[in-house]
Amino acid sequence: MFSFDEFEKKTDYRIIQFFSHSKNNIDNFDNHLKTPDMPDPRLILFAGHAGTGKTTLAKRAVPLLSQKFGHDFFFLDKDTAYGAFSSHIMGLLTGDPADRDSPTYLQHLRDQEYSGLLDITRENLEIGNHVILVGPFTREILAGKFFQPTSLGMPEHTVCKVAWIDLSSEEAKRRIQKRNDKRDHWKLANWETYMKRRVEPPSHPALMRLDNGSFDAAKFDALLEFLLA
């Protein structure tokens, strides 16, 4: 048995030991996060217009990029993340769950979707996950924001590369018709108007274009090398 004073001293000492040990663990964890062999956060965007095959190529690229890079990637696709949610909201707002082209969508929901995708991307980069993001992001690319990732709220030292998937308008229309997605009905019914939104991406060292008219293994491998350079 020991006195209350002795108990208090032992308790204080144990508390000091606990916090000292905890601080060491935190410091060790911070040092682990800063190890020299850990690459900078990497964001890879597969972008392009509807029907070009962005998602198909991105999914094909994931295991190959992970193998070449030596690190896994968090895969984030716009339609998967927000498809059901946006259908519900647009059903309430316009009566058409498939609406992705009306002024209501473009003015009141589009930016919120993209903002949410960027928030998820940033959060993953901050905790050490590299990210492959799939979506048009035309406005953001034209504004040059993906070439300055911090302007999108991404962590410092984030390396961002953009794969812009090209396809002729004729072939894109054929593929859109073939996939028969309700979200494309407006595009097909108003093709000439939609074509005005098919803008050209800017030239930039961090962006590489790939014509997806027919799959070319050599060109695809060159794209992968570019995305990891």
Image: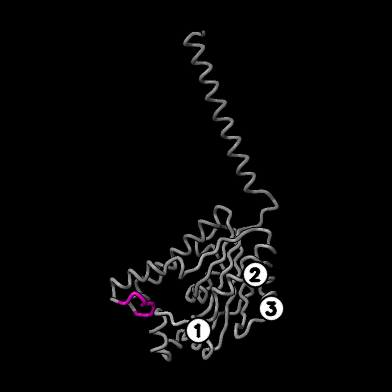
Residue wearing tag 3: 217
Is 101 situated left or right of 25 in this image? left
Q: CA distance from mark 1 to mark 2?
A: 22 Å
Q: In the picture, which quadrant includes the C terminus? A: bottom right
Percent x, y of residue 211 = 61, 83
Q: Residue at x 55, y 25 (%)?
A: 16
Which is more toward the observer, 9 or 57?
57
The image's mark for residue 126 is none
Q: Residues within 10 Å of mark 3 (few under 14, many from 20)?
A: few
Q: Is residue 99 magenta?
A: yes
Q: CA distance from mark 1 to mark 3?
A: 26 Å
Label 2 amino acid?
Leu
- How many labels were placed on the picture? 3
Residue wearing tag 2: 227
Residue wearing tag 1: 199
- Prevailing secondary structure class for the magenta stretch in the rendered image: loop
Magenta region: 96-102
Q: Residue at x 53, y 78 (%)?
A: 48
Q: Is residue 120 magenta?
A: no
Percent x, y of residue 63 = 64, 65
**If you read the primary sequence from the N terminus, does the residue marked by circle 3 or circle 2 appear first?**
3
Percent x, y of residue 69 = 68, 62
Label 1 amino acid?
Val
Quadrant of the rendered image containing residue 62: bottom right
